[in-house]
Amino acid sequence: MLNRPAPFPDENRLEATEIECLRGFQSLFRSLSLAVEAGVGLQVRGANGSGKTSLLRILCGLALAESGSVFWNGLDIRKSAAEYRAQISYLGHRPALKGELTPRENLDVLGALHGRRPDGRRIDEILEAVGIKRRHERPSRTLSAGQQQRTALARVMLSDAPLWILDEPATALDDPGIGTLRTALRGHLDRGGLVIFTSHQPLLDTGELREIRLPGTHD
């Protein structure tokens, strides 16, 4: 059982206004606005190629929109990039693990890189919560795709960042793994965190969730 961490500030808010995203010379979407407050989950929906991953990368500050702005607590993220990065935990299509390191070593190193090095007990608690503790001394490259995804989820949980931005976090997870993911998402929202995600799986109940659907199909 994980110890319950302190709640996040309830004034946290992410807002995007009039975002346009191009792929080459083609506009994937334009005039897109959204807002997410503490304790809210937002699911981004759309057909393959409609720009879901591109939108998440813009919201993370990893990609620039053609036009429009993203604000964290009222500040443009382009003007407060370092401060904003400290508030985010991003999970992309790949687990972003070093294959030669064990899951435990990966979590320790990634935490240190972000200035949030946790103690060993906290790492063990989270690895146990995601079902990896028995394999935590094996090189990550020897783990199955689902086990690597569980380890990536553990990295997100360990970050202590209020804003989670997750691109298809249920990829390669079995039913117990998806249950663990749902529990982690609900716990983060209960704590006053924010979650923005894409998924083909129902990960949150309707009462916990907002949705935004991207227009068009660009397969």
Image (cartoon, rainbow, N blue to C red):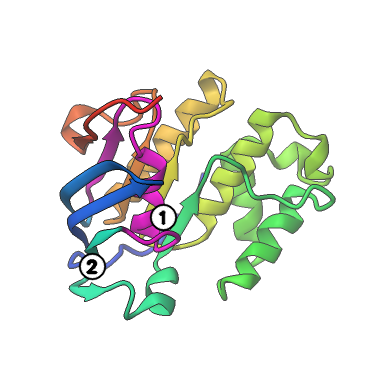
| Mark sitting on residue 4 | 1
Q: Nearer the viewer, residue 66 or 131?
A: 66
Give the x, y percent position of residue 56.
37, 49
Q: Which mark is residue 119?
A: none
* Left or right side of 92 for 9: left
What are the residue bounds of the magenta stretch?
39-65
Q: Secondary structure at mark 2?
A: strand
For the view shown, which residue lies furthest in the front direction?
25
Q: Quadrant of residue 174?
A: top right
106, 92: nearer the viewer: 92
Where residue 184 appears, as percent x and y from the top left, is 43, 42
| Residue 149 seen | yes
Q: From where the camera sits, is residue 117 visible? A: no
Q: On the rendered structure, is 172 left or right of 183?
A: right
Amino acid residing under circle 1: Arg
Q: Which residue is mark 2?
A: 71
